[in-house]
Amino acid sequence: MSLKTIVDSYLENNFTEIQKVRKENGFSWKPIVNQINKDLVDKLDPEKESDRDYVRNRFLAIRRNANIPKVAPILKHLSKDYSYLNTYTQKLLKYKTDEEEFKLWKEEKARLQNQVGLHVVAGCIHFPAVNTKFYAAFLQFLSDLGSNLKGIHLIGDIIDCKSLSSHDKGQVSNTTLEKEYSTSNLYLDRLDSVLPHGIEKNYIWGNHEERYTRILKQVDTAKFGKALLSPTAGCRFIERGYTVQEDYMNAKIQLGKYLDLIHGQFVTANSTKKHLDVYKKSIMFAHTHKMGSYFDTDKASFNIGWMGDSNHSAFNYCSRVTKEGWQNGFAVVNIDSLGFYHVQLVQWYNGRFYFGGKEYRA
């Protein structure tokens, strides 16, 4: 029998299982080629790209041929709208041909592969109401990481937007939006100055930035249009090289294959468990200003704390008891070569934090 006949026979008889293995392994053909080589022939090398492409092309040819009795019933139940997720700039990319499917997968694979290494995730910084001592130590930490840093991800409530808050409605505010943006830009300039060139930089809005959207829905304010700068424009995030997502309820950043970063949605007695129960996949968020983790089999939820100053007037709307429960912190995530995440929560406590055996303090 020819190699083509042997391979086609195996692919047809194991069509459903192969389809499952492809998805579980990120559409990698190596385990499939290895299994064919192990069971049937000794002519295929799973490490050889040309052999993997040969098996892939035979499989796609079989999938296109709906006249094969063993495959046709299966094809009816396969999704024709399988979508690859581009986690950075678009929501869904749908393929139309087998070649386009493979190209999209290769692009996503390359994108995820470029994430291998160390990432820093911070949320709820609340510029300009930031904990200045913590922030100074945080910048020193980033500077020490140097070229080891692969990405920084700001997951919402980076700008406090106190001047747009409904809590101050009808009252004289002690700040203006112009002043908030001006001071926030100074803090962001310091952040950019310690970041390596060319790293991945993401910024998603939180519910505090959403204050801008809410106030623009008011009839009188809507008249200002784009003259009233958004947090994205006012703090020049795009010019700074960040990929920005402004729909904070739906925005997410994917690290590796298995961890999503969001701003956060639920404030409960156990917010980490609540987020995992709802999202049903590994998740990292801020929002609650608390820290914690919750694990369930191979999935986990991480609440990374905040970087604000609870004594700042921006938080006078909260009770003393509420603020005493807040915890300053951030997260460090290492993505390994297989796309798995390794998380370390870093807490600012008693005027310092530790990472890699080194003390950081202002």
Image (cartoon, grey):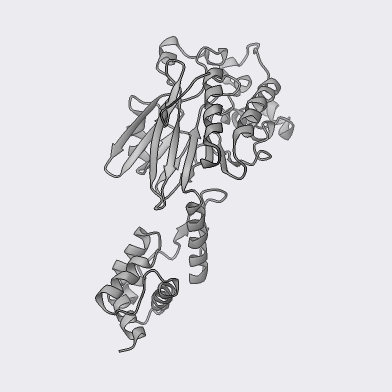
Residue 6 sits above or below residue 89 on the image: below
Left or right: residue 179 compared with residue 80: right
Left or right: residue 314 compared with residue 225: left
Q: Position of residue 150 (x, y in %)?
A: 52, 43
Q: Residue at x 63, y 34 (%)?
A: 192
Left or right: residue 198 compared with residue 84: right
Q: Residue at x 39, y 37 (%)?
A: 343
Q: Return the residue nearer the eye: 315 or 254.
A: 254
Q: Quadrant of the N terminus?
A: bottom left
Q: Residue furthest front?
A: 357
Q: Return the residue nearer the eye: 314 or 360.
A: 360
Q: Position of residue 80 (x, y in %)?
A: 43, 66
Q: Return the residue nearer the eye: 353 or 235.
A: 353
- Residue 282, by quadrant, is top left
Q: Residue at x 61, y 45 (%)?
A: 198
Residue 65 sits above or below residue 282 on the image: below
Q: Position of residue 40 (x, y in %)?
A: 26, 79
Q: Residue at x 56, y 51 (%)?
A: 90
Residue 78 appearing in the image = yes
- Residue 342, by quadrant, is top left
Q: Position of residue 11 (x, y in %)?
A: 32, 76
